[in-house]
Image (spheres, rainbow, N blue to C red):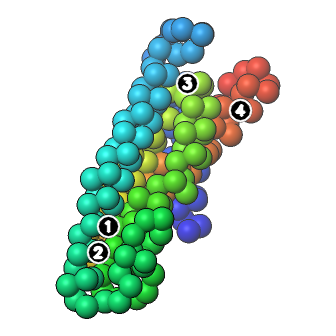
Amino acid sequence: MSMLIIKSLGASLLGAYVETKYGPDLGSGPLGLPTLFGVTPLSLTAISFWSLLHGFLVVGRARSKYIKLAKEAGEKEVDERYALPNLYAQGTSQYAMAFNCIQRSHQHIFETFTTICVTSVIGAVHYPICTAITTLSYGAGRIALSNGYASGEGDAGNRYSSPLARFMWYGVLCNIILATVSSVSFMTGKPVL
C-alpha cells in the first residue's frame, strides 16, 4: 500500500509539474476553464454509463441465473435468500458465493466513484491533461477489477486477474493528489507547481 501511495504521489506531482511548465497553452473555454477540461467530465460520464450497464446486464442477469441454479441444486429458501430486496445472497453455497462476487463487482464501484468524480473535476481545473489521463486510468482499472470479480465464480481473488485492475487505485490516488494541488492553487491564486 505504501508503494502505491508513493508511486501515485510521484506520478501526480511530476505530471502536474510537466503540464504546468511544458504543456500546451490550452486557452480558455466556457467559464474560463481550459479547453481540455471537458475530457474529464466526458470520461466520468462514460464510466457512469458503463456502471449502469454493468448493473443491469451483469448483476441483474446473474441474480436470475443463480436463483435458478440454486433451486435446481435443492437449496432451501432460495427466493428469500437470493431475491430482491436482498443485496447479497445469504449463505455460503457455491451459488451464493458466485452471485455475491458478481454483486460485489457492481457494489464496489460506489465505494470510490464519488471520490473520483469530485477529485477529477477539481483537478481538471488546473491540470486537465494529467487529470484526464488518471481518470481514464481509473476507468480502465475499474472495468478490469469489476470484470475480474464477476468472472471469478465465487473467488474474490480473481478481481486482480487483469494487470489493469490496479490502475483503478492509481487513478483514485492520483486524482486525490491532483485535486489537492489544484485546490491549493485556488487558495494561493497561482499555480503551485
Count of marks, rendered view:
4
Q: Amino acid at mark 2?
A: Ile
Q: Which residue is mark 4?
A: 183
On residue 67, which mark appears? 2
Q: Depth check: 81 or 54 in front?
A: 81
Camera-side mark, 4 or 3: 4
- SS class, disc 4: helix
* Residue 168, image x, y percentages: 44, 54
Q: Which residue is mark 1?
A: 63
- Quadrant for the C terminus, please: top right
- Tell me if residue 43 comes above or below residue 147 in the rendering: above
Instruction: Indicate which disc residue 21 carries.
Output: 3
Q: Residues within 10 Å of mark 4 (few under 14, many from 20)?
A: some
- Report how far apart the C-alphas of labels 4 and 3 lie in the structure: 18 Å
Give the alpha-carbon distance from disc 1 to disc 3, as whole Å. Answer: 52 Å
Q: Marks 3/2: CA distance? A: 57 Å
Q: Amino acid at mark 1?
A: Arg
Q: Is residue 181 left or right of residue 149?
A: right
Tell me where residue 102 sits by quadrant: bottom left
Q: Sequence-wise, which precedes: disc 3 or disc 2?
A: 3
Q: Mark 4 vs mark 3: which is more N-terminal? A: 3
